[in-house]
Amino acid sequence: MGIVDDEPAQRLLLAETLNRAGWRTLCGENGYQAVDIASRCNLLLLDVRMPGMSGLEALQQIQQLPAPPVVVLLTAYIDVRDAVAAIRMGAADYLEKPVDLDELLTVIEDALGLGHRDQEVLDLPPGVIAESEALRDLFRQALRVAPTSATVLLTGESGTGKEIFARLIHARSPRSAGPMVTVNMGAVPEHLAESELFGHEKGAFTGADQARPGRFEEADGGTLFLDEIGELVPALQPKLLRVLETGVFRRVGGTADKRADVRVIAATNRNLEEEVAAGRFREDLYYRLNVFPLRIPPLRERREDIIPLAELFLKPWKKRLSPAAARALTAWSWPGNARELRNVVERAAILADGDMILPEDLPDTLRLLPRENVPSESPERPLMEEAQRRAILEALEKTGGNRTKAAQLLGISRRSLIYKLRAYGL
């Protein structure tokens, strides 16, 4: 942990606080030392106003390092322009002097991703974003079903992250040491689907020069993820039902029954109830798959996740979103969900001249879309967002700009408040 401040008493106080919390510290007193220390720490507390090289100038150089640390700015001056400039240049956060020591530890925890004191911490894989309560509740359900042997049916639009949930359930299950085998039923030619799932014997069909195990055999002792299960041809549906009920199947061209100890997780972007009603999907198979259903909401239903996801996708590019670009991303309906969001922000990162993504770096469909005409939007949404914006400003005013206390007043996590501040350009 690095601490750079030109005031000796401030350095000592911060160092003692962090040492008591279990961190080792490196201290410096000017911007030049900050650049040197930055290469040797995970997080740097950096004063803005220092003689010689200022904190902002040092930050600019630090961001050019191959692996820059997380930077939190310290300032005795409530200068919004400095704060905005710092965030744009890559700072994770800033603290006002005199530093509230409780807030200091909270900010460090948030900046390093160590958890939230005012929000339940979910044990999620690295790189998984779940700011919205809808998604957090879904992950809670996934973690609850993971240790069981129940068949899980994941439903949701394309690009919502169904495979992420499947992999999480497998990883947290007693089968985690076994294989996880994935089959996209929509990508398997109809005439090869049975062989793909159950394998075949030599000579079973033209081109079957040797016997080959199917996916059920490969997944023995582990998990089989059947993606796009709604594409399964009707002729195979009774055979899949049999193996789900008994664990028994036969290879194509075979005469002997085989067994596989497999947990099945299925996923689809179709409405299987409608497929059943239309006669395209067996009702008994649907109920056998739908033991534990998980519906993953589209991105437009969990807008709190849009900016955190975008920032995650931008990390390798070392670019940040301007407030106006963040507002444009939040306004869009994302029919392609997280997959579309990733494509958009990575394209913007390539087009952006500097380290800041501006609205003009985004596709025309996003930056020219009036907020009141956002597809699938409630007409009341702009009014709701304006009410949220006013509530945030009032909370900040009541707490003297203390974002930790403002978040507590609003009943949200500090990190959620920071995302909203960015999205609303505050």
Image (spheres, rainbow, N blue to C red):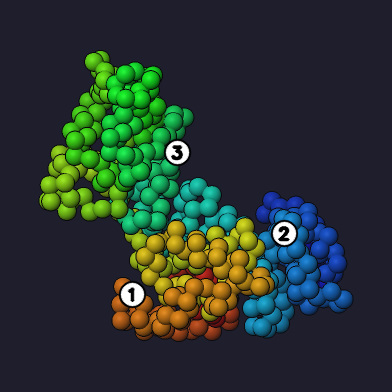
Q: Residue furthest front?
A: 206
Q: Nearer the viewer, residue 114 or 219?
A: 219
Mark-to-mark CA distance, 1 and 3: 37 Å
Tell me which numbered mark, 1 or 3, is placed earlier along the sequence: 3
Horizontally, is 361 left or right of 265 in the view? right
Answer whether residue 206 is visible to the viewer in this image.
yes
Secondary structure beneath disc 1? loop
Q: Residues within 10 Å of mark 1 (few under 14, many from 20)?
A: some
Report the residue marked by disc 2. Answer: 68
Is 61 located above or below residue 20 in the figure?
below
> Which residue is rendered at x = 75% and y = 63% of the image?
64
Report the residue marked by disc 1. Answer: 375
Q: Residue furthest top?
A: 256
Q: Nearer the viewer, residue 164 or 343?
A: 343
Residue 91 position within the rendered picture, expressed as x and y whole percent measured from the top left:
67, 68
Amino acid beneath label 1: Pro
Secondary structure beneath disc 2? loop
Q: Nearer the viewer, residue 326 or 293?
A: 326
Is 77 located above or below residue 180 in the figure?
below
Q: Residues within 10 Å of mark 2 (few under 14, many from 20)?
A: many
**Label 3 with label 2: CB-CB less than 8 Å:** no
Answer whether residue 147 is visible to the viewer in this image.
no
- The quadrant in which the C terminus is found is bottom right
Report the residue marked by disc 3. Answer: 171
